[in-house]
């Protein structure tokens, strides 16, 4: 067979199978366009100069989206190969050898790779401008323009190479599939999955056990470190359970309905139940995959939207005032104590600058262990991710100035909150050998620059601070017990159109002082860059997941239409009413396509607690904010899923109505 003929057959195949290949190649083009965009951002000069730390997050996005893309492409290739089995069998009946069919597949994939490469690079460059500007807006960088996103030839070449490698791999994979089957097998497997599947009780039991175990871990785990360790175990258990229960429970339920004679032999239910039993054997695995992908989208966009909603609050809570000067202990080199240094620098500031709301801060930062409702020093217990805790102790006068409150405390009293919910209702807290009566604050009062198991304590005055310091030992880098130092700071705002910079700080430095300046503006830029990068990561992964789900739904509708067309015509020929046929089709389609959505919503609902715990990595502790973001994504995803389903279902109804 000549190459010219193979080329002609390949071109005709792509044209005749456009109902399959156009969505397939378009979806791959979108995913590869995202790869081009991310690789171009890694090399972008503007990103490198302004936000070099973001490139690490972009690399993570390339990795995760790449894995998702490969999984989806393998699924889509398997679907297309299955749809063409009869075609390949017919080629062999007409005298073509398997090597000729293999060459035909090679030509088809070479043409597909060329089309995909051009589309992906052009689409990537066009969408890249939009995502580049979106990334900079998320990071609150308004200085970027579209001119800062030039065409990246290196990213284009790499994208082209990846696409060619992917399609060559698919060619080899299809060659391998083809070499393992005979003509009769190809004819038979084109209609495989029509028989009634068996009930699998052992798989059901295993699925229920693993699902309950995954749900239990997701619901009872508390604290960021524990949640981070447990999260991936829970994901694996729930994913495994999803596939196991889809394979077993769905069949068992349908067979139970079939066993109910009064229900099953009703005309409204007979065709629906029998049809579902016949098709579930070939559909159940892909439905489980859809459920997992839908869950991933809800979790990804739910956490991303929560981050976006909480960004401004995190910036506002990152510092008490616009400027903060911290005093570092010079040890034996300083003859003046830190409190005296603080008073002296405060006097100089008041004399030289127009200050607003000067706060003389004193605080303790301790690492302790939470155990049985109490806090104990590190050297009195065994540290684990569950009990290792950070304790921040501040003065009530400072708290009142920062928050505009008017709390009054006795020596044995303290304001208190914790990131661990089990401590929220305690009336007393034992810290080393001291016990405090607690007045509870909200979890929002915890400083946003702290991550992990956090305890925030506000005490009456400096005496209580020193008492805590005297009874709590910390550990140095060598593991030796030491006293945690009291930290001193000056926090202030300046009058309008004034600034405080390193030169001003240098003027305050003396032979015995070691001052460090922090500006809210600079810190906010770091926070926006950090959060914006993670938001971008969530958006990219979410887009890839949406593309996967859309095409999987499309292929599912197309596959169902091809399988049901002959059955639909037979039902009309035997005299069934049009209304009964439509009702039967509607019930089957509703079952098939609502099942992944329902399962995903249940998974995401159970996962909301552990996802909220993980968001403490970004100091997101406002549950109402989280529920707002998570709930909005729930509602939005249901609507989008319905729209995608309606758009793709038109393909199904066109297929079954074809004579």
Image: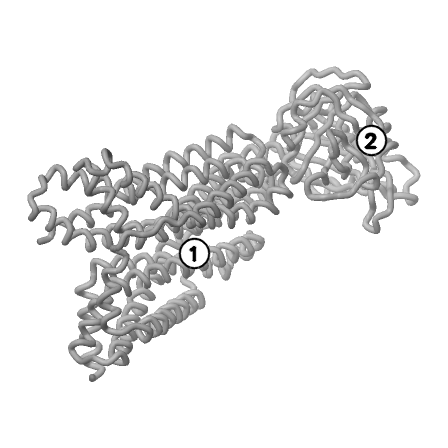
Q: Whole-percent x and y of residue 1?
A: 20, 84
419 or 163, which lies in front? 419
Asked if residue 494 can be seen in this view, the reply is no
Q: CA distance from mark 1 to mark 2?
A: 49 Å
* Residue marked by disc 1: 68
**Who's the residue at 55% across and 39% down the image?**
218
Q: Whole-percent x and y of residue 235?
A: 51, 47
Q: Residues within 10 Å of mark 2 (few under 14, many from 20)?
A: some
* Residue marked by disc 2: 432
First along the sequence among labels 1 and 2:
1
Left or right position of 253 against 339? left
Q: Whole-percent x and y of residue 634?
A: 40, 36
98 or 651, which lies in front? 98
Vertical position of residue 15 compared to residue 137: above or below: below
503 or 293, which lies in front? 293
Left or right position of 435 against 216? right
Q: Residues within 10 Å of mark 1 (few under 14, many from 20)?
A: some
Q: Quadrant of residue 615?
A: top right
Vertical position of residue 148 compared to residue 215: above or below: below
Q: Whole-percent x and y of residue 185?
A: 26, 69
78 or 266, which lies in front? 266
Local SS, label 1: helix
Asked if residue 195 can be seen in this view, the reply is yes
Residue 129 disc label: none
State how the image is colored. one colour
* Residue lying furthest bottom: 2
**Who's the residue at 89% across and 43% down the image?**
331
């Amino acid at each position: 067979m000549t190459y010219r003929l193979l080329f002609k057959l390949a071109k005709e195949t792509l044209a005749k199978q456009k109902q399959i290949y156009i969505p397939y190649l378009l979806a791959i083009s979108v995913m590869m366009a995202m790869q081009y965009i991310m690789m171009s951002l890694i090399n972008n000069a503007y990103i490198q100069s302004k936000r070099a730390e973001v490139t690490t997050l972009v690399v993570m996005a390339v990795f995760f989206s790449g894995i998702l893309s490969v999984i989806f492409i393998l699924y889509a290739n398997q679907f297309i190969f299955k749809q063409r089995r009869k075609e390949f069998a017919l080629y062999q009946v007409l005298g073509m050898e398997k090597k000729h069919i293999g060459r035909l597949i090679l030509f088809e994939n070479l043409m597909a790779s060329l089309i995909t490469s051009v589309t992906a690079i052009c689409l990537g460059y066009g969408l890249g401008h939009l995502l580049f500007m979106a990334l900079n807006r998320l990071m609150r960088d308004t200085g970027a323009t579209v001119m800062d996103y030039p065409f990246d030839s290196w990213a284009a070449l790499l994208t082209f190479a990846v696409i060619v490698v992917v399609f060559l791999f698919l060619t080899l994979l299809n060659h391998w599939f083809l070499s393992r089957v005979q003509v009769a097998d190809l004819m038979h497997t084109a209609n495989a999955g029509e028989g009634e599947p068996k009930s699998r009780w052992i798989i059901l039991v295993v699925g229920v056990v693993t699902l309950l175990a995954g749900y239990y871990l997701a619901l009872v785990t508390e604290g960021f470190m524990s949640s981070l360790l447990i999260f991936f175990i829970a994901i694996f258990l729930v994913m495994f359970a999803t596939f196991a229960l889809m394979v077993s429970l769905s069949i068992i339920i349908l067979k139970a309905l079939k066993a109910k004679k009064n229900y099953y032999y009703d005309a409204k239910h007979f065709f629906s139940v029998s049809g579902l039993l016949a098709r579930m054997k070939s559909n159940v695995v892909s439905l489980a995959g859809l459920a997992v992908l839908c869950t991933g989208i809800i979790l990804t966009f739910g956490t991303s939207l929560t981050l976006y909603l909480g960004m401004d609050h995190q910036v506002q809570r990152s510092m008490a005032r616009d400027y903060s000067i911290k005093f570092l202990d010079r040890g034996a080199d300083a003859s003046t104590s830190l409190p005296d240094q603080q008073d002296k620098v405060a006097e100089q500031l008041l004399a030289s600058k127009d200050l607003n709301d000067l706060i003389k801060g004193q605080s303790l930062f301790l690492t302790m262990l939470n155990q049985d409702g109490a806090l104990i020093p590190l050297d009195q217990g065994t540290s684990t991710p569950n009990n290792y805790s950070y304790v921040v102790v501040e003065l009530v006068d400072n708290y009142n100035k920062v928050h505009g409150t008017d709390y009054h405390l006795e020596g044995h009293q303290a304001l208190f909150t914790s990131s661990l919910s089990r401590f929220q209702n305690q009336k007393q807290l034992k810290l080393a050998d001291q016990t405090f009566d607690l007045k509870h604050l909200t979890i929002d009062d915890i400083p946003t620059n702290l991550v992990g198991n956090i305890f925030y304590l506000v005490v009456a005055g400096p005496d209580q601070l020193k008492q805590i310091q005297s009874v709590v030992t910390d550990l140095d880098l060598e593991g030796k017990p030491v006293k945690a130092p009291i930290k001193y700071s000056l926090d202030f705002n300046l009058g309008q159109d004034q600034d405080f910079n390193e030169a001003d700080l240098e003027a305050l430095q003396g032979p015995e002082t070691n001052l460090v300046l922090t500006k809210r503006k600079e810190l906010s830029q770091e926070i926006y860059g950090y959060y914006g990068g993670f938001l971008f990561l969530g958006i990219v992964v979410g887009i890839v997941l949406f593309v996967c789900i859309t095409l999987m739904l499309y292929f599912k509708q197309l596959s169902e239409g091809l399988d049901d067309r002959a059955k639909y015509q037979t039902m009309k020929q035997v005299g069934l009413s049009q209304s009964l046929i439509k009702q039967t089709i509607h019930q089957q389609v509703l079952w098939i396509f609502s099942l992944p959505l329902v399962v995903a919503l249940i998974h995401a609902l159970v996962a909301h607690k552990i996802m909220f715990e993980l968001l403490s990595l970004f100091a997101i502790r406002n549950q109402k904010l989280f529920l707002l973001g998570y709930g909005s994504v729930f509602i939005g995803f249901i609507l989008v899923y319905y729209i995608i389903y309606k758009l793709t279902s038109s393909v199904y109804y066109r297929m079954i109505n074809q004579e």
